[in-house]
């Protein structure tokens, strides 16, 4: 019987919410790196982080500063760094971050699934809001289809199952 060694990292916020999102992201990454390395050294094959792991869970907030927490996938700093760790330790990493689609103005609670050889296998994403001048008028409850985004499902794989832990499709998530 084949065994799969999985790991999950969940921790409290390592910087005050009074700080800017980039300062918080750096503090959270710094706190995660020793644990990522430990998981890699122990032979973890699939590593998952908590939802929006580089920031506090700010989604219910009305503070527009959190728009600055959004990153690009696959070209953002967190995704690029995790691709390096995935390749170094030959493990799949499920990376839940806040993502912005600059074309549509839609913000997503996204889990990028990074393969052990470092490419992105796919994303599972739940729309959070559209960026409006008045934050309270976001459209987080309306269905959003990001035009121009290709769907990249990772169907029938154990990586998909772990991504489901990070972003539940029952809450409106979908592969893209």
Image (cartoon, rainbow, N blue to C red):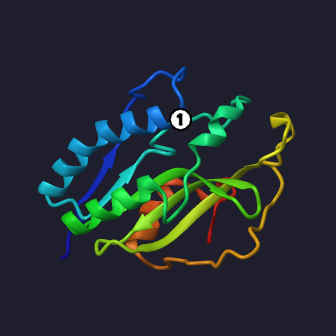
Within 10 Å of disc 1 (Cα), the crowding (few <14, some 14-19, many 20+) is many
Q: Residue at x 70, y 59 (%)?
A: 102
Q: Observer-nearest residue: 61 or 175?
A: 61
Q: Position of residue 149 (x, y in %)?
A: 67, 74
SS assignment at label 1: helix
Q: Residue furthest left?
A: 41
Q: Residue at x 45, y 32 (%)?
A: 23
Left or right of 40, for residue 68: right
Q: Quadrant of residue 158?
A: bottom left
Q: Position of residue 31 (x, y in %)?
A: 30, 36
- Residue beneath disc 1: 21
Query: The N terminus appears in which quarter of the rendering?
Result: bottom left
Left or right of 27, for residue 55: right
Q: Position of residue 56 (x, y in %)?
A: 52, 33
Vertical relation: 24 (above or below) 111: above
Q: Residue at x 51, y 24 (%)?
A: 19
Vertical relation: 43 (above or below) 62: below
Q: Residue at x 48, y 52 (%)?
A: 96
Q: Observer-nearest residue: 143 or 18?
A: 18
Q: Quadrant of residue 53?
A: top left
Q: Position of residue 80 (x, y in %)?
A: 39, 61
Query: The C terminus appears in which quarter of the rendering?
Result: bottom right
Q: Count the labels in the image.
A: 1
Left or right of 76, for residue 93: left
């Amino acid at each position: 019987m084949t065994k799969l060694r999985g790991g999950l990292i969940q921790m409290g916020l390592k910087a005050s919410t009074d700080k800017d999102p980039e300062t918080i992201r750096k503090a959270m990454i710094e706190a995660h790196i020793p644990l990522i390395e430990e998981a890699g050294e122990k032979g973890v094959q699939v590593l998952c982080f908590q939802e929006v792991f580089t920031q506090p869970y700010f989604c219910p907030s009305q503070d527009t500063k959190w728009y600055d927490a959004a990153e690009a996938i696959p070209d953002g700093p967190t995704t690029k760094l995790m691709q390096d760790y995935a390749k170094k330790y030959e493990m799949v990493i499920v990376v839940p971050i806040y993502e912005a689609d600059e074309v549509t103005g839609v913000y997503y609670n996204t889990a990028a699934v990074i393969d052990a050889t470092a490419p992105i296998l796919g994303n599972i994403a739940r729309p959070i809001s559209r960026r409006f001048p008045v934050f309270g008028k976001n459209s987080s409850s309306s269905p959003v289809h990001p035009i121009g985004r290709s769907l990249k499902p990772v169907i029938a794989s154990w990586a998909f199952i772990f991504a489901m832990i990070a972003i539940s499709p029952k809450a409106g998530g979908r592969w893209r």
